[in-house]
């Protein structure tokens, strides 16, 4: 058994069913060991995709996702994805290859200080120094990634810890030839190094999986919030991604939100928590609602740019914040009641103490729903407006009607995806994946892989802007090889529309924002997928149905939609 086998043993014992990777000589034993033990090894075309996939899997399952990448450029290629996971609070472990222990810092192939690179962007980054520590190191990484405030962990596994001992000794012996005093001293040093490297390497116990413990609220805090909620006439609840970190409790959390009876806005991974049309859920005019509320509860939502750094919430309102992260709990705005705990678990506990609508709250909810209905009517009118190409609002309205009840939506883009968020309604909890607070482009292909691994029987849609699609196109080769029947809808307006709209207006210059209306459907065909062109609004329903049939047959599909210009999101730039 070599080091790669030992790592695979840990992953198997911890119930990790798949490993995302891009092959490299530094990590080949990990991949070989994983496949030997029955783990599904999903190999991609860009290391960032592997980490994005592990991130998505973690979000949908609540369990740690794992990616393995080779040394040097393989590791550096993941940094954006690692940072995205950190800011999204996703439990991810990155197993990184590295130069041989004895050659680090001596100019070996792809040898850099990887730990210095990863430490600012992870909960923990460390190197495994000897074979006997591989098992406890990987177990530690999986535990640390998931506990407390989840996040990514990087484990550096030097190449001479992973390959069979006999082979490593041959490699070292080949480097220690000659009869000179210096050569004999070198052989002595290398032999001593090898003894330490492989000493006591067998017989280490591998721990079984245990769900991580989430920070629970103090009973007194729950009672205090319940009392404040009982006095509120116009309460408002905002639920964010962090509330779904315990993904396996999604239905319980949804029931708790419904029982509390508060008007609610859902964001990030919480989208879909209450289904497509629950009476308590609101979709529009959030800023105005916040300004009129007398109590605002932020469940896993920080006061960052999305809430104008807390300025959307009036000082006269009682602000309640629930967050696992002590810093985010008080970011930019100190709450009247702060609860450091898992937001989803807190909602479940609170529902046992308080909840239910009353007459005053019913009037408040009716007022908010009337505004929502008025905004929906405006969107309907905009969707019906004539366009020189396909109207994106009309496209998404028809797509929403075409969604299966067990569909998963992946969002990767700017303007096109933001438009989708107003019209697409996830059918169930944990059915919407977007990059999160980092606003990263390029998550799409990896998120598709993670979603397919966790929900293999679900209908899978990916919404791409044409700019963002450039990051993911090559991974259709991956989808074909691994049988991932995703339907990708590409909004092709020939530009980076979200940037161009404000840039042209403010600077009167479109520099860097213009793209070609490329034949993305043909490029997908070249990679083995099915490609469909949608350039006529009268064919929207027909093309969507054709795509569904192709995907049901096991084939990935790209719909290249030639969309027209839109001012639907005028003035939506964020800072």
Image (cartoon, rainbow, N blue to C red):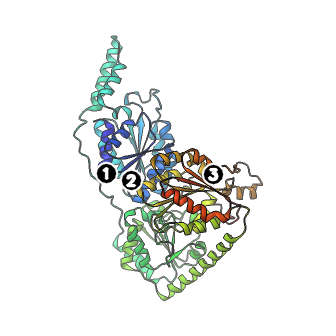
Q: Please, which residue is most extreme toward the bottom here?
A: 359
Image location (x, y in percent) of residue 281 = 51, 75
Q: At x 47% / y 27%, what residue is drawn?
A: 107
Q: Label 1 to label 2, Cα distance in Å?
A: 10 Å
Earlier residue among tags 1 and 3: 1
Q: Which mark is residue 467?
A: 3
Mark 1–mark 3 CB contact (< 8 Å): no
- Circle 1 residue: 14
* 481 horizontally vs 382: left or right: left
Secondary structure under tag 1 reads loop
- From where the camera sits, is residue 422 visible? no
Earlier residue among tags 2 and 3: 2
- 571 shown above or below 289: above
Q: Label 1 to label 3, Cα distance in Å?
A: 38 Å
Quarter of the image that includes the N terminus: top left
- Circle 2 residue: 64
Circle 3 packing at 10 Å, graded few (<14), some (14-19), many (20+), is: many
- From where the camera sits, is residue 488 visible? yes
Image location (x, y in percent) of residue 138 = 34, 45
Earlier residue among tags 1 and 2: 1
Secondary structure under tag 3 reads helix
């Amino acid at each position: 058994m070599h080091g790669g086998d030992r790592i695979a043993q840990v992953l198997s014992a911890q119930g990790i069913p798949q490993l995302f990777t891009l092959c490299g000589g530094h990590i080949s034993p990990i991949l070989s060991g994983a496949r030997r033990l029955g783990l599904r090894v999903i190999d991609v075309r860009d290391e960032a995709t592997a980490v994005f996939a592990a991130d998505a899997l973690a979000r949908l399952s609540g369990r740690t996702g794992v990616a393995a990448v080779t040394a040097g450029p393989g590791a550096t290629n993941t940094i954006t994805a690692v940072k995205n996971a950190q800011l999204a609070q996703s439990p991810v472990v990155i197993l990184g290859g590295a130069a041989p222990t004895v050659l680090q810092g001596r100019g070996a192939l792809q040898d850099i200080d990887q730990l210095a690179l990863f430490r600012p962007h992870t909960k923990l980054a460390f190197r495994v120094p000897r074979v006997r520590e591989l098992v406890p190191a990987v177990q530690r990484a999986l535990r640390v990634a998931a506990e407390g405030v989840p996040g990514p962990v990087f484990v550096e596994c030097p190449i001479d810890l992973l390959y069979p001992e006999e082979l490593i000794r041959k490699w070292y012996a080949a480097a220690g030839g000659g009869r000179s005093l210096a050569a004999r001293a070198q052989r002595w040093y290398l032999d001593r190094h090898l003894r330490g490297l492989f000493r006591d390497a067998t017989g280490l116990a591998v721990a079984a999986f245990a769900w991580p413990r989430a920070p629970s609220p103090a009973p007194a805090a729950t009672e205090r919030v319940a009392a404040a909620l009982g006095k509120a006439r116009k309460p408002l609840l905002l639920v964010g991604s962090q509330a779904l970190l315990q993904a396996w409790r999604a239905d319980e959390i949804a029931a708790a939100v419904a029982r509390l009876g508060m008007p609610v806005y859902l964001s990030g991974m919480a989208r879909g928590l209450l289904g497509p049309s629950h009476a308590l859920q609101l979709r529009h005019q959030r800023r105005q609602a916040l300004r009129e509320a007398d109590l605002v509860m932020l469940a896993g939502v920080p006061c960052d740019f999305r809430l104008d750094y807390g300025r959307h919430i009036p000082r006269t309102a009682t602000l309640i914040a629930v967050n696992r992260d002590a810093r985010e709990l008080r970011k930019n705005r100190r709450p009247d009641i702060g609860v450091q705990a898992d937001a989803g678990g807190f909602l479940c506990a609170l529902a046992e103490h308080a909840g239910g609508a009353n007459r005053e709250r019913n009037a408040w909810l009716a007022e908010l729903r009337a505004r929502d209905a008025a905004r929906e009517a405006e969107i309907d009118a905009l969707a019906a407006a004539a366009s020189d190409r396909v109207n994106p609002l009309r496209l998404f309205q028809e797509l929403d009607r075409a969604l299966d009840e067990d569909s998963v939506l992946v969002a990767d883009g700017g303007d096109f995806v933001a438009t989708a968020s107003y019209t697409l309604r996830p059918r169930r909890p944990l059915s919407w994946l977007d990059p999160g607070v980092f606003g990263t482009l390029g998550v799409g292909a990896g998120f598709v892989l993670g979603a397919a691994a966790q929900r293999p029987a679900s209908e899978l849609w990916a919404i791409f802007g044409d700019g963002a699609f450039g990051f993911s196109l090559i991974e259709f080769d991956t989808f074909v090889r691994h049988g991932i029947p995703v339907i990708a809808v590409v909004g092709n307006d020939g530009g980076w529309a979200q940037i161009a709209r404000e840039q042209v207006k403010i600077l009167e210059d479109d520099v860097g924002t213009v793209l070609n209306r490329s034949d993305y459907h043909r490029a997908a065909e070249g990679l083995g997928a099915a490609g469909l062109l949608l350039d006529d609004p009268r064919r929207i329903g027909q093309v969507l149905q054709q795509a569904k049939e192709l995907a049901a047959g096991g084939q990935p599909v790209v719909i290249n939609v030639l969309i027209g210009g839109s001012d639907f999101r005028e003035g939506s730039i964020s800072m």
